[in-house]
Image (cartoon, helix red, strand yellow):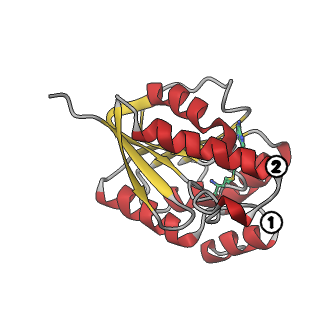
Amino acid sequence: MVRLSELGQQARENHIPVMQEEGLELLLQYIQEKKVKRILEIGTAVGYSAIRFASVSSDIQVTTIEREDTLYQEAVHNVEEFHLENQITLLHGDALTISVAGTYDFIFIDAAKSQYIKFFEKYKENLAEDGVIVTDNLAFHGMVEHPEMTSNRNTRQLLQKIRNYIDFLKTNEEFDTVFYSVGDGISFSTRKKKK
Ligand SMILES: C[S@@+](CC[C@H](N)C(=O)[O-])C[C@H]1O[C@@H](n2cnc3c(N)ncnc32)[C@H](O)[C@@H]1O
């Protein structure tokens, strides 16, 4: 039986891009302090962050979406290993097309970075009135700030898409966003308060 502390380490050793511990701690603290109960995650990978979220409290429910078959199967296995089947619902499919019912207090976007705006626009419909949309990887290993770190054309295009998403958040008329430079760069977006 793999321990919780080993699951993330093992995933990283297998080159699965699970959340960095520092960023994860920030999310776990928020979940605990705000007594978050319903979480929707876009991008399960092997279920590491979903398992960490669910482990904060037994009354937390996590729904998480993964499109890659082998990763989804591995997540199913890991959720069973940790006996969290009653708290974690694993959905297999493309988050851009799958339909998800219900409202969530905390929506975590951690999937294809080029699609962040689309994920945000789609899933804000599932956000509870005072809920939060959290996004990871906004620094993209420091390259968003320092694009000279790469000369790869695809990476540069991706960096531009992340920058577009940051602008989208900064200029959004419906949501206020706070950016944290912890982990790989994280944002917390909440609905603007009505005046
Ligand atoms: C960064 S990993 C998720 C890591 C995970 N949240 C963790 O920290 O343990 C991103 C995952 O999103 C999945 N993904 C990317 N685009 C997706 C989409 N459109 N629908 C569903 N899953 C997607 C990828 O296959 C990958 O496993």
Quarter holding the C terminus is top left
Horizontal arrangement in the rendering, residue 163 relative to residue 16 (left or right):
left
- What secondary structure is marked by label 1? loop
Mark 1 or mark 2: name the one nearer the start of the chain. Answer: 1
Residue at 52% of width from left, 27% of height from top?
121
Residue 76 placement (x, y as % from top left): 73, 50
Which of discs 1 and 2 lies nearer the camera? The answer is: 2
Residue at 36% of width from left, 58% of height from top?
30
- What secondary structure is marked by label 2? helix
Horizontal arrangement in the rendering, residue 68 relative to residue 172 (left or right):
right
Q: What's the amino acid at mark 2? A: Arg
Residue 160 placement (x, y as % from top left): 65, 44
Residue 89 visible in the shown view: no
Disc tally is 2
**Along the line of sight, the residue nearer the viewer: 58 or 10:** 10
Q: Which mark is residue 121?
A: none
**Along the line of sight, the residue nearer the viewer: 32 or 118:** 118
Residue 81 placement (x, y as % from top left): 69, 62
Q: Which image quarter: residue 173?
A: top left
Residue 139 visible in the shown view: yes
Residue 72 placement (x, y as % from top left): 76, 46
Quarter holding the N terminus is bottom right
In the rendered image, which residue does mark 2 sit on? 153
Mark 1, residues whose alpha carbon is within 10 Å: few (<14), some, or many (≥20)?
Answer: few
**Along the line of sight, the residue nearer the viewer: 2 or 119:** 119
